[in-house]
Amino acid sequence: MLNPTIITQLQAIVGETRVKTDADSLKTWGCDWTKHYTPSASAIVFPATTEEVQAIVKLANQENIVLVPSGGRTGLSAGAVAANNEVVISFDRMNKIVQFYPADRMVKVQAGVVTEQLQQFADEQGLYYPVDFASAGSSQIGGNIGTNAGGIKVIKYGMTRAWVLGLTVVTGKGDILHLNKGMMKNATGYDLRHLFIGAEGTLGFVTEAEIKLERKPRDLRVLVLGTPDFDSVMKILSAFQAKLDLTAFEFFSDLAVQCVTASGDVQRAFPEATPFYALLEFEALSPAIEEQAMQVFEQCMEEGWVINGVMSQNETQAQNLWRLREDISETIAKYTPYKNDISVLITHVPAFIADIDAIVQENYPDFDIVWFGHIGDGNLHLNILKPANLTKDEFFGKCQVVNKKVFETVQKYNGSISAEHGVGMTKKPYLDYSRSPEEIAYLQAIKLAFDPNNIINRGKIFDVK
Ligand SMILES: O=C(O)CC[C@@H](O)C(=O)O
Ligand SMILES: [Zn+2]
């Protein structure tokens, strides 16, 4: 329970109606999509400017109040969950496009701008914001920056980091910093902007960002190829990459397709089921490129790597094929899945998957496993579905035991325990499988340099003394 005088002080900063303490609001803004924790926020505050955020941070330092940043609440690692009576700072009101710089192909936005809103703005200018994922309709740019969000176009366009040219932040100390100010070139020492990207809001609040835009892709074609086994998926990747510049390369298993098509409004790519599918996309900039793609497709069929496949003939078909991949996460949510978001070098993917498969077969003989992911980037999403006869706690307990083996394998291949969803609270106990003790000590020192009283997003990624 928050002291009523603090509520009054928060209201004095943001306005009386901009502080919510009713049960519904505490529940809604106190959590993200993670199902592991019970939200327990003490208040939700909706600032409208960087200066208001600064005033809140200064008050929090004086009164020792812990703050949790909240964007579109689509996170999957509990990075934006308030489970310990924290005050949540929501960016819902900071949703304006601030300024467009056509000569720089850049736009300055507030942190609460929704990803899709930015994509649409870019489109209206004849340009393109390439970071894309299924939750683009809800996720906010500030949250994307916090997790260095990836998604379905990383193979060509990189992660969110590649598109952030500048940041305005309020540090945990309450200082406003303008980092890199949108410049392409700036060789003046440490680039603090990059520390805030992927920091999951532990160093301070991102309030505005300068975002680079790109030329629009043209004549995109989507191919879905059914494969007899996982190894064929990687052979298909090499065959296509040798001849074409891909804008996406994803994979998923037939169980994923069963879950998506069960929803009723998405069709299979072709009638017969195959164990795995590769989805790839490229720009058919000329008939020769399209011809080249068909040749590789035929070569893959001759090699036995592809059993069946289709190529989109129009935009609607392309969208339907994409939905087979993009709808997976949402359609499996009802099974309370235990999620892994792991990555290794592409070189190691075949051996890594074989090891993970052996662990899964031995330890989860009775559980349904949905395999999918951005395998062209070496990123696998492993989702274990909860059997109806187990409670959530029993199920997560069992998965956590097996998780140790999964993460030992990640470590064996020098991989990451979180490729794109972040560490938050769910992956915090496993951080040392990907980061050395020396590295974690530097991270903790950096955290305390920006947030000496440990006011912002306390207990996320790692603990500090
Ligand atoms: O739900 C998941 O495990 C992955 C969600 C998202 O990163 C995706 O690639 O669809
Ligand atoms: Zn993903």
Image (tube, rainbow, N blue to C red):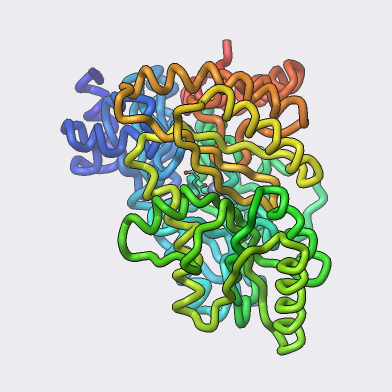
* Spot occupied by residue 404 in the image (x, y as percentages of width and height): 60, 19
Q: Quadrant of residue 37?
A: top left
* Spot occupied by residue 168 in the image (x, y as percentages of width and height): 56, 48
Q: Is residue 79 visible?
A: no
Q: Is residue 383 left or right of residue 223?
A: left
**Residue beneath the point at 22% across and 29% down:** 8
* 205 lies above or below 67: below
* 61 lies above or below 124: above
Q: Is residue 88 left or right of residue 207?
A: left
Q: Is residue 422 left or right of residue 306?
A: left
**Viewer-proximal residue, 409 or 177?**
409
**Residue beneath the point at 31% across and 22% down:** 391
Pick the quarter of the image with the N terminus. top left
* Spot occupied by residue 215 in the image (x, y as percentages of width and height): 64, 76
**Viewer-proximal residue, 459 or 287?**
287
* Spot occupied by residue 324 in the image (x, y as percentages of width and height): 47, 60
**Viewer-proximal residue, 462 or 336?**
336
**Residue beneath the point at 45% across and 30% down:** 367
